[in-house]
Amino acid sequence: MKKCAEIAIIGLGNRGRDVYAKASKLYPDKMKIIAVADTDPEKTALMAMEYDLCEGACFGSGEELLKQERLADAVIIATQDRQHVDHAVLALEKGYHVLLEKPVSPKLSECVRLAETARRCGRMVIVCHVLRYTPIYRKVKELLDGGSIGDVVSITATENVGWFHQAHSFVRGNWANSEKSSPMILQKCCHDMDLYPWLADKTCESVSSYGGTYLFKPEKAPEGAGKRCLDGCRAKEGCPFDAESIYLDNKLTGFRRGNRGWPLNVLVPSGPTEEKIVEALKTGDYGRCVYHCDNNVVDHQVVNMNMTDGTTMSFTMCAFTPDVARYARFMGTEGELIVNMNVQEPEKCGLVVRRFGAEVTEERIDVMSLSNDFSGHGGGDQVLTEEFLDLVRGEKRESAYITSLDRSLESHYCALAAEYSRTHGGIPVKIKEFV
Ligand SMILES: NC(=O)c1ccc[n+]([C@@H]2O[C@H](COP(=O)([O-])OP(=O)(O)OC[C@H]3O[C@@H](n4cnc5c(N)ncnc54)[C@H](O)[C@@H]3O)[C@@H](O)[C@H]2O)c1
């Protein structure tokens, strides 16, 4: 049997601790946590307790961990967007393989720097495009590769961010301001820029884009809105973005409705209780009025993509949707394939193939039969982690390479070119020239 992969984790937030560290419990024969690092001592202490790590295995930052001689086979980097490349470059130079959270970087030059370092050091960098690993999109890939609808000529795709998800992550939360994190089209939609061209086996040649922040700004605040939801706001009644309503009463996210996971574990990493949530809402970022935050990322954006083979894709990202879901329609020379992927409510997923003929035939694929576990990005988190571990252990070669750095960067180039277009009046941008 191949040895257990020895892993270091840098960044013990929602992804590092709640997703990747847990893999060592799910696959104890495949993953052993050797060292962890975070600038927040509470998070390293929690990890030490949960995973029985000694003091010497816990570091006060990624930089400190990476100053040591190589401690493990691979490192998982789950810090914030603008820190990824510095941490990954240090790790590669120390000889680690790297599992790197997306986006690689909001800076084009940094993406290129990392690709060059990876080549020079001869180590693997796998980027966490988790959707490629989900059972539903693997089925779509199999159908499209098998020619089920002929040649794909046009794709329409929508990312339904979800009204409360937008408010949590992109208005009040970590990714609200592109100067501190990344533009929305990269941060959220590098998945889409990656996924659909990969599914249809296309390469993007040029893009154009429009979009902006329609709602979440002071001039759109209802009369009487305060700076914080729990501070006597007079517009609280009937406001869908009221923090108390989202974090306590909402059917999917509310503590009083039984939720104990995301997004409550972001507010209270040590484990949510009603008292601690209320305290976080009174004092922290997540209790701020959505009309009075320091956000600048868009709440709606469209991107048109022209592919190298003359086919096209039209993509819409929008905050104002009830579901957190991705809808896509592939139109081919012999039929169409429609896929709806709902991250939080998998029973709402759908996959249909309709083929042309004397009578249009329709095949409905039972998505729920594709897996027993749709948790964590529709099942993608787990499969990606396990395949990365297999790769590090030398057990698997091919499949995990589906999100190698070079492939991932194509999506980043598209997203950054789209952002350039959006901020320059929607001009068409040729990817090769842009890069
Ligand atoms: N693949 C996906 O689908 C997916 C989903 C969500 C988030 N992400 C990405 O994952 C990354 C992490 O997101 P998150 O939600 O876990 O964020 P988070 O803020 O919860 O976690 C980041 C952690 O990094 C720590 N940190 C900051 N500076 C550090 C340093 N110098 N050394 C070590 N640790 C440091 C912070 O204290 C924090 O605990 C982000 O880049 C995000 O875009 C990817």
Image (cartoon, rainbow, N blue to C red):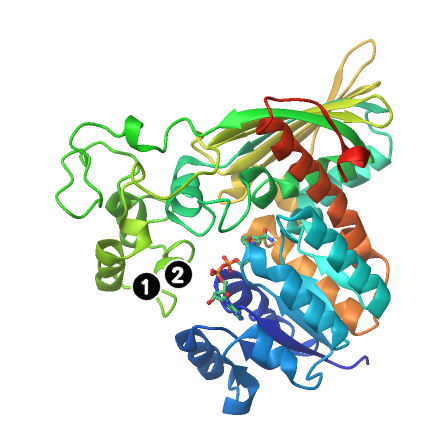
Q: Is residue 354 left or right of residue 288?
A: right
Q: Of the residues shown, which amino acid type is indicated by label 2?
A: Asn
| Depth order, front residue of 355/332 | 332
Residue 63, relative to residue 111: is it above or below? Answer: below
Q: Looking at the rendering, which quadrant does residue 280 occupy?
A: bottom left
327 to the left or right of 114: left
- Which quadrant: the C terminus? top right
**Residue 220 % position (x, y):** 30, 27
Q: Is residue 213 above or below residue 245?
A: above
Q: Quadrant of residue 373?
A: bottom right
SS label for mark 2: helix
* Residue situated in front as seen by the camera: 63 or 137: 63
Asked which quadrant contains residue 68, the reply is bottom right
Q: Residues within 10 Å of mark 1 (few under 14, many from 20)?
A: some
The residue depicted at 80 percent of the width and 51 percent of the height is 406
Give the residue drawn at x 52%, y 83%: 58
Q: Is residue 92 left or right of residue 33?
A: right
Can residue 388 be seen here? The reply is yes
Q: Which residue is mark 2?
A: 265
Position of residue 262 relative to residue 35, above or below, is above
Q: Residue at x 44, y 38 (%)?
A: 296
Q: Position of residue 213 (x, y in %)?
A: 44, 30
| Residue underneath mark 1 | 272
Assign a secondary structure to mark 1.
Answer: loop
Q: Position of residue 28 (x, y in %)?
A: 64, 78
